[in-house]
Amino acid sequence: MLLFFGALLLIYAYLDERVGVLSNEWGMPNEFITRETFFYSSLIAFVITNAILYTLHKLLILSRHSAKTERVLALRLDLAAWLLGFAGTLNLLFVFTMLFFGLFNSSENYSIDRYVIFVYAGPLLLAIMFGLLVYILMKRRA
């Protein structure tokens, strides 16, 4: 969480008044939003996503007392742990996105090609997390 807020504040400080969100075929920004819109929409997306995942995690933890079997209890605890890992993965994806937007809109002449690994790392981490979810669900049903 602190990493996201640090990245958001750092990027916000360096952004121009207009933030490019889409680019043309030459890699130049051609659609813009204001810096404040970028900041608040990023903050709202982060807070809502984390609130939903934290609430689901708490509901799974609190419902463990109503589990009728050890198998159901173990599944709920595994899913609660997965939700925390998923929240961490999404938070890391948010940080990567903030950093990429900062580089994309920087007035300095950075080569974004060197940082494209962060763009690919996000979906890869999400795929790994969903693979773990499938493993958890299959393991408990067997």
Image (cartoon, rainbow, N blue to C red):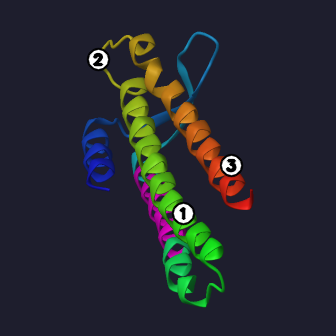
Q: Label 3 to label 2, Cα distance in Å?
A: 43 Å
Q: Main secondary structure of the magenta part?
A: helix
Residue on which disc 1 sits: 78
Q: Is residue 14 left or right of residue 79?
A: left
Q: Residue at x 37, y 33 (%)?
A: 99
Q: Quarter holding the C terminus?
A: bottom right
In the rendered structure, which amino acid carries the disc numbered 3?
Answer: Val
Indicate yes or no whether the magenta region holds residue 122: no
Q: Position of residue 83 (x, y in %)?
A: 52, 61
- Element carrying mark 3: helix
Q: Position of residue 44 (x, y in %)?
A: 47, 62
Mark 1 near mark 2, Cβ–Cβ under 8 Å?
no
Instruction: Name which residue lies at 32% across and 21% down.
Output: 107
Q: Amino acid at mark 2?
A: Glu
Q: Earlier in the sequence, mark 1 or mark 3?
A: 1
Mark whose residue sits in front, 3 or 2: 3
* Whether label 3 touches label 2, CB < 8 Å: no
Residue 134 disc label: 3
Q: Which residues are magenta?
A: 39-55
Residue 15, picture quadrant? top left
127 and 6: which is toward the camera: 127
Q: Give the residue furthest to the right.
A: 142
Instruction: Please state which amino acid type lies under the numbered disc 1.
Output: Asp
Between the residue at mark 1 and the residue at mark 3, the CA separation in whole angstroms equals 12 Å
Residue position for label 2:
108
Is 79 rendered above or below residue 25?
A: below
Residue nearer the viewer, 25 or 133:
133
